[in-house]
Image (cartoon, rainbow, N blue to C red):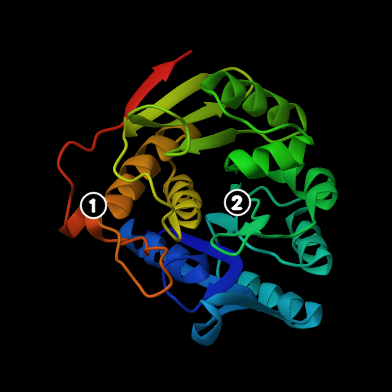
């Protein structure tokens, strides 16, 4: 039986992030994917590729959700950029009482734009408690917790535990390439198991779509019956290859290359998982 997954996310016309990234990653895992569009992200080449975001009407998002959930029996759900409070609440209503694995990528900033989306309180109250796995980066984790900057591995551990205490079943706080050192480090916590995942750093620069792709890869693993820990480990390996194979583009933030693990694997990429 082919697993099926639904992403609720924004469309990134550059192709590296958003629902485009999610659908590509689902396909890499052999998962049939569909999408609900929450917004469309475009770029202005005459203004140094400044971002613009056009949000879908709440009624249109509701109609998409109702349609997708009626057409398919999904094995996992994933959400990315929701953009507005109305969109987030609409998703929360559909998740209530739903037992499907739900991967929550709490997008609070559009990479490369610096534009924060002020949904922190709504996320904490309505979506964090419903997450099977939540995947905040350093900035998102700090924002969700109302904390100072996260700068060390110890900070990742404390943040993962604190976000779990907000109700998420599993938490991955992504240090990635932003922490000092030669390794890209993420920390997973589910209330019992605390795991440090690391790979050699393959890029010190921002790569568009890495976070989206990581979350959708986890969703694909969960849809196929993997445990959260195993899904995170496989997602990290596939996305590390995708970052290593990144494509340059005119915006200055290269695009994640989703089939890289399959077609252009990078030498020396391996995930080390260690219980703490």
Residue found 31% across the figure and 54% down from its top: 242
Residue denoted by label 1: 261
| Nearer-N-terminus badge (2/1) | 2
Determine the image quadrant of residue 249: bottom left
Q: Is residue 242 left or right of residue 34?
A: left
Q: Secondary structure at mark 2?
A: loop
Determine the image quadrant of residue 26: bottom left
Residue found 53% across the figure and 28% down from its top: 188
**Disc 2/disc 1 C-alpha distance (Å):** 22 Å
Q: Position of residue 157 (x, y in %)?
A: 59, 22
Q: Is residue 105 left or right of residue 200?
A: right
Q: Quadrant of the N terminus?
A: bottom left
Return the residue found at the far top: 276
Return the residue found at the far bottom: 46
Look at the image and tell me whether residue 71 can be seen. Answer: no
Residue found 71% across the figure and 52% down from its top: 98
Where is 189 relative to 44, above or below?
above
Q: Secondary structure at mark 1?
A: helix
Residue found 75% across the figure and 75% down from its top: 62
Look at the image and tell me whether residue 175 can be seen. Answer: yes
Return the residue found at the far front: 47
Residue denoted by label 2: 105
């Amino acid at each position: 039986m082919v697993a099926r997954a639904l992403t609720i996310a924004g469309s990134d016309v550059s192709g590296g992030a958003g629902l485009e990234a999610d659908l590509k990653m689902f396909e890499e895992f052999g998962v049939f994917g569909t999408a609900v569009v929450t917004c469309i992200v475009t770029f202005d080449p005459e203004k140094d590729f400044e971002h613009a975001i056009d949000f879908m009407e709440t009624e249109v998002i509701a109609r998409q959700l109702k349609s997708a959930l009626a057409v398919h029996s999904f094995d996992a759900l994933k959400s990315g950029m929701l953009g507005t409070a109305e969109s987030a609440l609409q998703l929360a209503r559909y998740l209530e009482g739903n037992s499907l694995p739900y991967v929550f990528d709490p997008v609070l900033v559009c990479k490369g734009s610096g534009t924060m989306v002020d949904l922190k309180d709504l996320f904490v109250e309505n979506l964090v408690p419903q997450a099977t796995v939540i995947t905040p980066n350093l900035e998102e984790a700090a924002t969700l917790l109302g904390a100072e900057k996260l700068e060390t591995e110890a900070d990742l551990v404390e943040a993962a535990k604190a976000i779990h205490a907000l109700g998420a079943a599993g938490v991955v706080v992504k240090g990635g390439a932003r922490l000092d050192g030669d390794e890209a480090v993420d920390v997973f916590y589910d209330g019992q198991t605390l795991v440090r995942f690391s790979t050699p750093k393959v890029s010190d620069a921002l790569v568009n779509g890495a976070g989206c792709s990581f979350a959708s890869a986890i969703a694909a693993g969960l849809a196929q019956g993997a445990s959260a820990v195993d899904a995170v480990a496989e997602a990290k390996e596939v996305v590390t290859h995708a970052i290593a194979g990144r494509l340059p583009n005119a915006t200055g933030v290269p695009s994640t290359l989703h089939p890289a693990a399959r077609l252009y694997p990078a030498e020396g990429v391996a995930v080390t998982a260690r219980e703490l």
